[in-house]
């Protein structure tokens, strides 16, 4: 892969499909993933974090459908990925939006992923889960 956007598209498509081999194929050995106040280092730990989050979602909801859109930024090595997760339980579907900023070093791969909390999204999911008697615990 020569074009940085190819790394990001592969990352996002892999996450949408729960294809962690695809995700791993574009992660740098030095990758770091910032989510909340936590910073996760290394491909194995990043993959574990993604896998556990998806497994939890599939365990909680009747159906989970992931989608994404990659957008370039003014910095040609940083991309904004908008994720749209459709979470369904008891016939009701919630569309949850998330965003990540992904930094690529051509020839090395994805070196940094920063999760961005979008206003109101966490609360929306919490209310949806509470309405259906679901808990992350």
Image (cartoon, rainbow, N blue to C red):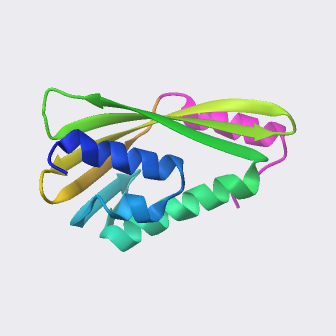
Residue at the front extreme? 1
Query: What range is drawn magenta here?
Result: 119-137
In the image, is 92 to the left or to the right of 124?
right
Instruction: Please tell me how many numbered marks the rendered image carries.
Output: 0
Residue 73: x %, y % from top left: 20, 28
Q: Please tell me whether residue 78 belongs to the stretch shown in magenta.
A: no
Left or right: 105 in relation to 17: left
- Name the residue rendered at 85%, 34% in the picture: 91
- Residue pushed farthest bottom? 44
Q: Residue furthest right?
A: 90
Horizontal and vertical percent for residue 88? Answer: 75, 38
**Split into 4 quadrants, where in the image is the C terminus?**
bottom right
**Whether residue 120 is situated above or below residue 131 in the rendered picture:** above
Question: Where is residue 39, by image quadrant?
Answer: bottom left
Residue closest to the eye, 38 or 61: 61
Asked if residue 121 lies in the magenta stretch, the reply is yes
**Residue 100 rendering spot, x and y as whole percentages:** 36, 41
In this orientation, which residue lies closer to the viewer: 45 or 72?
72
Q: Residue at x 12, y 51 (%)?
A: 106
Say which residue appears at 47% left-offset and 68% top-offset: 48
Q: Is residue 113 left or right of residue 98?
A: left
Which of the 4 image quadrants contains residue 122? top right
Image height of 68 relative to 63, above or below? above
Q: Which residue is painted at 19% across and 49% down in the image?
A: 104
In the picture shown, does residue 109 fall above or below 91?
Answer: below
Give residue 32's position: percent from left, percent from top: 28, 60
């Amino acid at each position: 892969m020569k074009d940085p956007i190819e790394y990001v598209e592969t990352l996002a498509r892999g996450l949408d499909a729960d294809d962690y081999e695809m995700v791993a194929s574009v992660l740098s050995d030095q990758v770091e993933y910032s989510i909340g106040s936590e910073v996760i280092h290394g491909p194995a730990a990043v993959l574990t974090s993604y896998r556990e989050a998806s497994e939890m979602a599939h365990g909680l909801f009747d159906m989970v459908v992931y989608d994404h859109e990659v957008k370039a930024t003014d910095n040609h090595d940083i991309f904004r990925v908008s994720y749209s997760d459709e979470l369904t339980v008891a016939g009701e579907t919630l569309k949850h939006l998330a965003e990540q900023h992904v930094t690529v070093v051509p020839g090395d791969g994805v070196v940094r992923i920063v999760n961005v909390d979008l206003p109101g999204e966490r609360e929306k999911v919490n209310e949806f889960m509470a309405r259906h008697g679901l808990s992350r615990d």
